[in-house]
Image (cartoon, grey):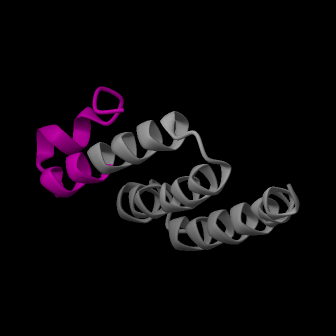
């Protein structure tokens, strides 16, 4: 992702925040797929939405990036609620 967004690093467009968001996302996703408990998987998956939302809103191309971020959050939470119900059922 850093290579794809070389413009951010080159022109120093809040480079440190971008790298911190990417690193946080990487760590949270690593934890997400290494935990053995389904509830922890769901919890860390939902936490991974926060850095992803920050990347979309902070460094998106189009002016509609705020709206895209809001849609991203609502669609992901609405689609993951059946997963939470299934995990609680089992």
Closer to us: 63 or 72: 72
Quarter of the N terminus within the rendering? top left
Residue 49 as seen in the image, left or right of residue 37? left
* Residue pictured at 16% horizontal, 50% vertical: 15
For residue 7, what is the image quadrant? top left
The C terminus sits in image quarter: bottom right
Q: Position of residue 42 (x, y in %)?
A: 63, 55
68 or 52, which lies in front? 52
Taking the image as shown, residue 7 lies to the left or right of residue 82, namely left
> How many marks on residues?
0
Instruction: Give the residue displayed 36% in from the left and 63% down from the top.
Output: 58
What residue is drawn where x is 49% and y is 54%?
A: 48
- The image shows residue 24 at horizontal and vertical percentages of 31, 50
Per the rendered image, the range of residues in magenta is: 1-21
- Judge whether residue 3 is colored magenta: yes
Query: Residue extending furthest top?
Result: 3
39 lies above or below 65: above
Please identify the quarter of the rendering in which residue 79 is found: bottom right
Nearest the viewer among 15 and 29 is 29
Q: Is residue 70 above or below residue 28?
A: below
Residue 80 % position (x, y)? 76, 60
In-image side of 74 versus 56 (left or right): right
Give the x, y percent position of residue 16.
13, 52
Indicate yes or no whether the magenta region holds residue 50: no
Q: Main secondary structure of the magenta part?
A: helix
- Give the vertical position of 66 relative to 83 (above or below): below
Front residue of 51/28: it is 28
């Amino acid at each position: 992702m850093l290579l794809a967004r070389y413009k951010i690093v080159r022109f120093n467009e809040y480079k440190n925040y971008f790298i911190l968001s990417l690193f946080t996302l990487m760590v949270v996703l690593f934890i997400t797929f290494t935990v053995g408990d389904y509830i922890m998987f769901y919890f860390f998956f939902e936490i991974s939405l926060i850095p992803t939302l920050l990347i979309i809103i902070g460094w998106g191309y189009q002016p509609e990036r705020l709206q895209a971020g809001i849609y991203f959050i609502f669609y992901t939470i609405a689609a993951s609620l059946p997963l939470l119900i299934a995990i609680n059922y089992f």
